[in-house]
Amino acid sequence: MMTHEELRRLLAEASRVFILTDENVAGFWLPELKRWLGCDDAVEMVIKPGECKKTLQTAQWIWRKLSRHGADRHAVMVNFGGGVITDLGGFTASCYQRGIRFIHVPTTLLAMVDASIGGKNGVDFNGFKNQIGTFANPLEVLINPIYLSTLPDREVLSGLAEMVKYGFIADPSMLKVDGNNYEQYLLRAGRIKQEIVDCDFTEQGCRKILNFGHTLGHAFEGWSAAKSTPLTHGESVALGMGCALWISVRRCGLSETVLRDYVPTMRRLLSLAPISFEETDVEALLPYLAHDKKNREGQTRWVLLSSVGSPVYDNVVPDDLVCQSVHEVLNLMR
Ligand SMILES: NC(=O)c1ccc[n+]([C@@H]2O[C@H](COP(=O)([O-])OP(=O)(O)OC[C@H]3O[C@@H](n4cnc5c(N)ncnc54)[C@H](O)[C@@H]3O)[C@@H](O)[C@H]2O)c1
């Protein structure tokens, strides 16, 4: 890990520094970041906030900016924001001139504990999540909890969902995380992710367990965005975990108690979400599963649990069981 001085030196020696951020983060924190990094003359690239900007169009806009400002292989890009910014910034930096150096400065809880760690970068494409992307690590991830002071409550809940996920797949003590104590779990959460990624950077095997709750989670996220009532990434994952637990009880012998104990947590994680899900919507999720990146030979591969802390990956689950899990979990939410 670099010291503050080493970081400032690195940026001072770069041919040019570019900061990618969104309007919300820029409004609260951009002048402060520039001061802290000592790069007043950095080129600012400020985009509108939201998942709808994680696209190839925005990537092209960024590449044009880099090109117009003469970015060469000695330039550095600082990605300052939530997971949309770190995914998009990591992707554009790792492709530009076959890769320039980049640094992540995550500002949401979700990006601090998850999105900024592990080197997965990308954009959504054709209405489906993360279809185009790269594996490339940032030079450094700078975590400063001060940024959480301006984060809306709904976004805090979104990050908590990914922390709860670590509780299910790796460290049951993380299941105790809530809106009052999450700062004390920040480091532990980041380490869990890093340890899993270190074993399997390109997701050939054990890294897949990080996708627990994400198979249906991405479907909920894509579906809700298409309906113009977007769920956050964490809300979608919270629902996806509920479904994965329900299926795990049927397919992997998971104790029903684990699902029952999760229901109040799931309700809390979704307490600020605009869910307007009708029975008829359940089948509309299936096309999103067909585009899941974990698919093989046309079959969706699921991460399930045999017990808390014991995930099992590459499970095939029939569509009727998937639909039933969504019905059941939505009933539990009522
Ligand atoms: N690469 C990975 O491994 C990985 C892992 C998990 C999630 N993701 C991706 O991350 C994205 C979701 O990230 P997110 O939840 O951080 O969303 P986000 O980047 O859209 O940020 C959420 C909202 O919070 C605002 N915001 C950010 N920081 C703020 C601050 N400090 N104060 C006030 N407002 C602030 C943003 O402007 C935005 O409106 C999704 O695209 C998801 O696919 C990637």
Image (cartoon, helix red, strand yellow):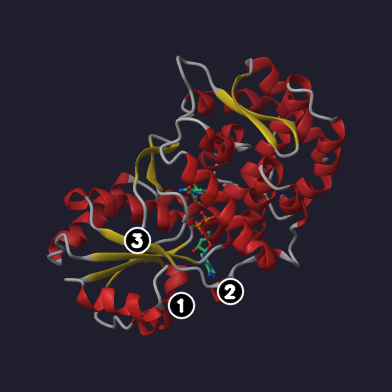
Q: Amino acid at mark 3?
A: Leu
Residue at (66, 26) in percent of width and height = 282
Kindly identify which residue carries mark 3. 139
Disc 3, SS = loop
Q: Which mark is residue 29?
A: 1
Kindly identify which residue carries mark 2. 150
Q: Give the foreground label among 1 and 3.
A: 3
Residue 274 position in % (x across, y down): 67, 49
User: Which label's residue is closer to the chain start, 2 or 3?
Assistant: 3
Find the distance from the CA under tag 2 to the CA under tag 3.
26 Å
The correct choice, above or below, for 13 with respect to 306 in the image is: below
Label 3 Cα neighbours within 10 Å, binned few <14 / some 14-19 / many ≥20: some
Decide if residue 192 is in sight here: yes
Q: Quadrant of the C terminus?
A: top right
Residue 176 position in % (x across, y down): 78, 55
Residue 57 position in % (x across, y down): 29, 48
Label 1 lies in ligand 1 vicinity (Cβ under 8 Å)? yes
Q: Amino acid at mark 2?
A: Thr
User: Closer to the camera, 222 or 35?
Assistant: 35
User: Which label's residue is closer to the chain start, 1 or 3?
Assistant: 1
25 with respect to 68 (left or right) = right
